[in-house]
Amino acid sequence: MSAVDLHADVLGRADGPTVLVLAGGAAAHPSYLGDLAGLGERYRLVVPHLRGVGRSSAAPLASRWEQGDDVDRLRASSGLDRCAVVAHSAGTRLAVAYAARFPERLSALVLVTPPAEYLVDVPSDVPDLLAARAGEPAVASALAALEEGPGLTDDDFTAWRLRTAPLGYARWDATTRAHAEGMRYSLAAARAFMAGDAPDGLRDRLAAVTAPVLVVAGAQDTAAGCVPVLAVADAFPRGEAAVVDGCGHFPWVEQPAAFRAVVGSFLDRALG
C-alpha cells in the first residue's frame, strides 16, 4: 500500500516509554479510550486515528490486514526499533495482523477483550453470560436492537451502536451510559476494516512472536465472551491472560484500578 498521512493523538507522560494504542469499533473514534485508566501517567500513548476515522477521515480505506503497514510506519515515525502495542476489541484484529507480519518489531503486546473466533476453536460462553442477565430490561432492548441491525449512515450506525451498548458493560448505569454516548463510528471505514479473511497459516505466523503478550478478558463480557478470550493467549509463545472481574467489554471504564494494575504491571515488566 502507498503511504498516507494519518493523524495520531499523543497523550500522557512526554518522557515515558512510548506505547502505540489501537482503538476498536471497528472504526470508532479513539477518544473513547481516554488514557486507559491512567496508563498515560506512566507511558507516552500514541493513538492513531485509523483510516477513515476522525482526523484521518480522508485517508483511503483499507482492511485491517492492509493497515499493518500503517502501524509499522507509526512505529518508525515514533523513532522505535521495536514497539509496544495496546489494542482494544476490533483494534486487536489490526494488532494481530501487525504481529503476524512484523513479529520482530514488537516489544510487547496487550490485547484487551479481543474477538477470538478466528484465532481459537473454543466454545463461547456468551450465551451463559447473557442468560445471567436475562432479567435486565436494558439488555433485552439491546438484544432486540441487535436483531434489527444498523442503518446505512454514520449517524444511524452510531445510534444503533448506542442502542446495543448495554451488551458491552457488566452494568448499565450513568457511568457506562455516558461512555457509550461519547462513541462515534464510521460505517464505511468499519466495513473496509473488516473486509477479507484471515491469511492462511495465521497461527503459525503468531508462533514467531517472541515478545510477551497479555490478553485481558472482562469476566462479564457479553460481546467477546471470557473463556474464548483467555484461550487467545495460547496462540503466542509468551502469552499470558488475565480476567478483570465486574466488567464487560471496556474494563478500564468499569474497573479502572484493576485494569490499570493488570496492564501497568505487565508493561512495566515487559518494557523494563
Image (cartoon, rainbow, N blue to C red):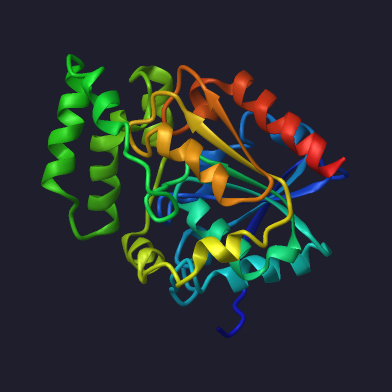
Left or right of 223: which side holds 102? right
Q: Position of residue 137 (x, y in %)?
A: 17, 19
Residue placed most toward the observer, 214 or 166 = 214
Quadrant in the picture for residue 82: bottom right
Q: Is residue 50 visible?
A: no
Left or right of 196: which side holds 35? right
The N terminus - image quarter: bottom right
Q: How many marks?
A: 0
Residue placed most toward the observer, 165 or 120 = 120
Q: Residue at x 64, y 58 (%)?
A: 8
Quadrant in the picture for residue 166: top left
Residue placed most toward the observer, 263 or 120 = 120
Q: Is residue 198 visible?
A: yes
**127 above or below 255?**
below
Q: Position of residue 118 (x, y in %)?
A: 39, 56
Q: Residue at x 37, y 69 (%)?
A: 197
Left or right of 147: which side holds 213? right
Q: Residue at x 51, y 27 (%)?
A: 253
Q: Position of residue 270 (x, y in %)?
A: 79, 42
